[in-house]
Image (cartoon, helix red, strand yellow):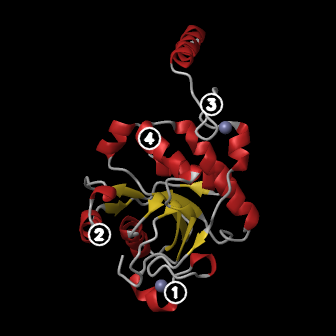
Amino acid sequence: MLLARWGKRAIQCCLDALFPSYCLVCKKEGNVCCKTCKQNISIQEMFLCPICQIDQEFGQVCISCRALSNLKQHIALCPYDMDLVLVQAIDRVKYQFEEDCIQYVEEGIKQLLEKYPEVYEKIDVVVAIPLHKKRYAERGFNQSEYIASILAKQLNISQQKLLQRTRQTKQQALCNKEDRLLNVKDAFAYISQEHVGENILLVDDVYTTGATMQEAARVLKEQGHSVWGFSVARGVLRSKKRRY
Ligand SMILES: [Zn+2]
Ligand SMILES: [Zn+2]
């Protein structure tokens, strides 16, 4: 056991020497997320109606969109803009497997909850949008689960698996606006668990048209839950007043 641990540490040391990490922001050698740069990030919280994108208190769905949305509310830490550190960080986690970059997101969530401590006071449980088991096996992790566990920890509530992907879907980023709805239709199933609260915070890394989150929220809503949405970044669509 001890030998195995030493061996692992030795391998890690060699890897660090061969492939040193550089801070995502200041490029200093050491860690992809250096302490200074982590503390220097700032959020640009987005409180927009999940459907029509008008400004709403804490991102609540507006009266005119209520019948169209399975989410009661959606909050993002920042707009989807590749110039922003938070967006670069989730991109690096997702596509380059640099899991340490999630620490920037952790700092962003901390800032949101410090600024608006009451925002999630009704939430009982945090749920991540799941990956299909095949994609999970390829990637080895689900970045939305990382984000959900940060939220659960900071809110001091539990994170539960209440959803599973029943079929593989194309990456939403590769679909056009019209295909996104069809792509995720009936892609989720409910996993019943004991002692689940009513109010769920559903978590995904990026919210673009909202099709994935709305479809997952529909499944939860059918089981009697109220669903709030959280994403690190939100893509702002040019055409307003459209169905997700
Ligand atoms: Zn740095
Ligand atoms: Zn609206």
Q: Which mark is residue 177?
A: 2
Front-lying residue, 89 or 198: 89
Residue at point 65%, 68% (across, down):
120
Could you say whether the residue bearing mark 2 is in a helix, strand or loop? helix
Query: Looking at the picture, how far across and down is residue 242, in whole percent?
Result: 36, 82
* Dots 1, 2 in contact, CB < 8 A: no
Whether residue 156 is visible: no
The residue labelled by disc 1 is 62
| Furthest residue toward top | 3
**Horizontally, is 60 left or right of 166 in the view?**
right
Q: Disc 3 marks which amino acid? A: Asn
* Dots 2, 3 in contact, CB < 8 A: no
Q: Which quarter of the picture shows residue 68? A: bottom left
Query: Looking at the picture, how far across and down is residue 143, in whole percent?
Result: 47, 47
Query: Looking at the picture, how far across and down is residue 194, in whole percent?
Result: 50, 59
Foreground tag (4 vs 1): 1
Label 2, label 3: how far apart the Cα atoms are = 37 Å
Residue at point 73%, 40% (across, down):
36
**Horizontally, is 125 left or right of 35 in the view?**
left
* Dots 4, 1 in contact, CB < 8 A: no
Q: Which mark is residue 141?
A: 4
Q: Disc 2 marks which amino acid? A: Lys
